[in-house]
Image (cartoon, rainbow, N blue to C red):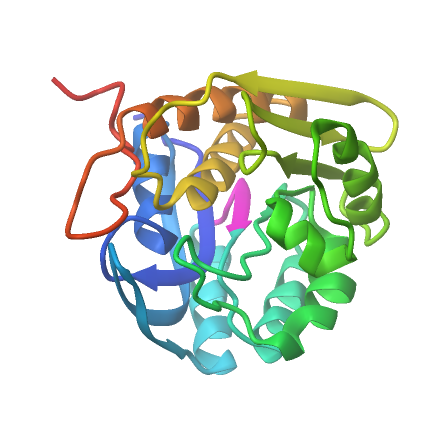
Amino acid sequence: MRIPPRVLTVAGSDSGGGAGIQADLKTMLALGVHGMSVITAVTAQNSLGVQGAWPLPAEAVRAQFRSVVDDIGVQAVKTGMLASAELAETVAALLADLSVPVVVDPVGISKHGDALLAASALDAVRTKLLPVATVATPNLDEVAWLTGVRVATEADLPRAAEAVLAYGPRWALIKGGHLDGDAVDLLTDGTTRHWLRAPRHDNRHTHGTGCTLASAIASELAKGRPVPAAVAAAKTYVTGAIAAGFPLGGGIGPVHHGWDRSS
């Protein structure tokens, strides 16, 4: 029997099912890999926002990680919401001992503007977590938060990427989804640039977009694809998921993780 590639997500739980651990595992299933999880925080969350968040103890995060990695093994890891400086440092130390691709989604705020990472954790993300990343996937708000660089146009994306790469990830994927026009992202390792474009879909139901993209990249890396090919495939997948996003509750609905498999 063929064993699918194994991908581990280290992130927070979204009780509404649109982002976080839930979105990660749905993405991994859709892309044909075996998803596993280390939960860093529990949130009370729905289509309207985040009503509460409770980080788990570092001991619980460390125990989950060791249970999965030591017995089952992993081919790639994706990180999302880490909540606190202690958890960011804990996860970074665990990842430093692995020799598999790591996708870091430096989650700072939710789609609704709710804080998902303590301000005191900024230095830990910069100096501990980003240096172990194969690919870092900040959006424009996260770029500004991490580096102070503010992006107003597509021409600003290379400068933003350089600022992120200065913290040590091998590749930076600067997501330009908040700009006007087509959804354009820049992937670079500081030497080569890969511009990824997709049409912008008139659909406000985009909850979980960042989690989904990072998990898709990790899934494709676990299959053995090189970084540029993995990111391109993930971009295609998330573009379809955004186009098929659907209303849920009274606010912003989720992207559709099974868009290419639904009847």
**Residue 2 in sight:** no
Q: Residue drawn at (48%, 36%), measured in percent from left and top?
A: 213
| Residue at (54, 47) in percent of width and height | 77
Q: Nearer the viewer, residue 201 or 228?
A: 201
Whether residue 154 is in magenta: the answer is no
Using the rendered image of the protein, determine whether residue 157 is visible from the camera's viewpoint: yes
**x then y, percent, for residue 130:** 72, 55
Quarter of the figure with residue 147: bottom right
The quadrant of the image that shows the C terminus is: top left
Residue in view at x 53 percent, y 40 percent: 75
Q: Is residue 237 left or right of residue 141?
A: left
- In percent of width and height, residue 116 lies at 48, 67
When asked about the image quadrant of residue 47, the answer is: bottom left
Of 208 and 249, nearer the camera is 249
Vertical arrangement, residue 164 with respect to residue 202, above or below: below
- What's the residue at 42%, 28% (across, down)? 238
**Residue 156 at what x, y percent from top left?**
77, 35
**Residue 122: x %, y % from top left:** 68, 69
**Image quarter for residue 140?**
top right
Q: Is residue 145 above or below residue 233?
A: below
In front here: 238 or 250?
A: 250
Q: Nearer the viewer, residue 161 or 261?
A: 161
Quadrant of the rendering where the N terminus is positioned:
top left
**Magenta stretch in the rendered image:** 73-78
